[in-house]
Amino acid sequence: MKILITNDDGINARGIIALAKEISKKHEIIVVAPREQKSASSHSISIHNPIKIREEKLDENFKAYSLVGTPADCTQAGLSLLGGDIDIVISGINRGLNCGTDILYSGTVSAAVEGAIYSVPSIAISMDVDWSKEDEDYSKAAKWISKILDVAEKDYLKENVVLNVNVPNINEEDIKGLKVCRLGKSTYKTNYILVEENEDKVYVTKGTRNDILEDDSDLYFLSQGYVTLTPLHFDFTNFKILDEVKDIFEDKVM
């Protein structure tokens, strides 16, 4: 297959390099990623600034480009300008999990969703890390995504679906397996710490994730030592209540 690889951590992030080297063993790949760190940029796109693209030398086995723009910009440029006929988009390997409702903030997931919007099957891959260190080994997550890609290529490539994959921060031999599950609900206790006061009050924030309440979600299964996979779709419609809301509003709001 011909695969577009992108991320939100930037073109030189160790996660994307590990992913590209692993996937290029079996597939033709092209890398298009932000020139700088763009975490938590969600699905923003550049509409007022020009897109700047530069070829980079990451590895002799594949072409790579950095882009001054957002992760979604990178996917769009890869599909429309640089990549030709792309069979699948893979976004990652992100430094840190993208699970639960945190996906709404994630540039990694949004880069994959951009592919699905344009009818290209997509995968987002993220790995939990120890944030007090910068010594994580992404080969574990790269091997898991390679195995998932093998199955997807054979049995499940849906053009409008994103497979969101998360890998726990434990030794490879301790991972219990793969769980396909729903998103959990990520909520945080956020502390605002005042660091400066003049015309503006300047705060830094520090968030602590609240306890996991569900026992059937990605948050739960990650805490139990599983790799999780959740199918996502860009249509946010709540179909369960669509008819109910229709009956309440259509004939009453004139």
Image (cartoon, rainbow, N blue to C red):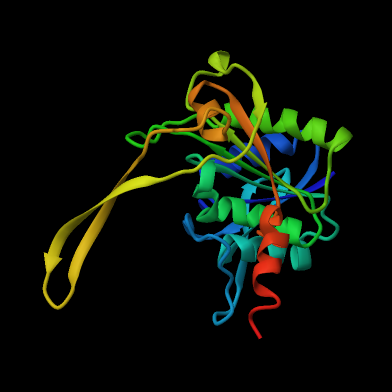
Against 183, is 39 above or below?
Answer: below
User: In the picture, which quadrant includes the N terminus?
Assistant: top right
Res. 131 visible in picture? yes
* Location of residue 134 in the rendering, given as x and y in whole percent from the top left corner: 39, 36
User: In the picture, which quadrant includes the C terminus?
Assistant: bottom right
- Residue nearest the viewer, comparing 119 with 12: 119
Residue at the spot 53% in from the left edge and 21% down from the top edge: 225
Res. 235 visible in picture? no
Residue at the spot 68% in from the left edge and 60% down from the top edge: 244
Q: Residue furthest bottom?
A: 254
Quadrant of the rendered image containing residue 251: bottom right
- Residue nearest the viewer, comparing 93 with 221: 221
Quadrant of the rendered image containing residue 113: bottom right
Left or right side of 197 for 214: right
Q: Residue furthest top?
A: 173
* Location of residue 105 in the rendering, given as x and y in whole percent from the top left corner: 50, 55
Against 69, is 181 above or below?
Answer: above
User: How many dots with numbers?
Assistant: 0
Residue at the spot 14% in from the left edge and 78% down from the top edge: 199
* Location of residue 107 in the rendering, given as x and y in whole percent from the top left corner: 55, 55
- Residue nearest the viewer, comparing 30 with 157: 157
Left or right side of 7 for 197: left
Residue at the spot 58% in from the left edge and 41% down from the top edge: 183
Against 105, is 184 above or below?
Answer: above
Quadrant of the rendered image containing residue 141: top right
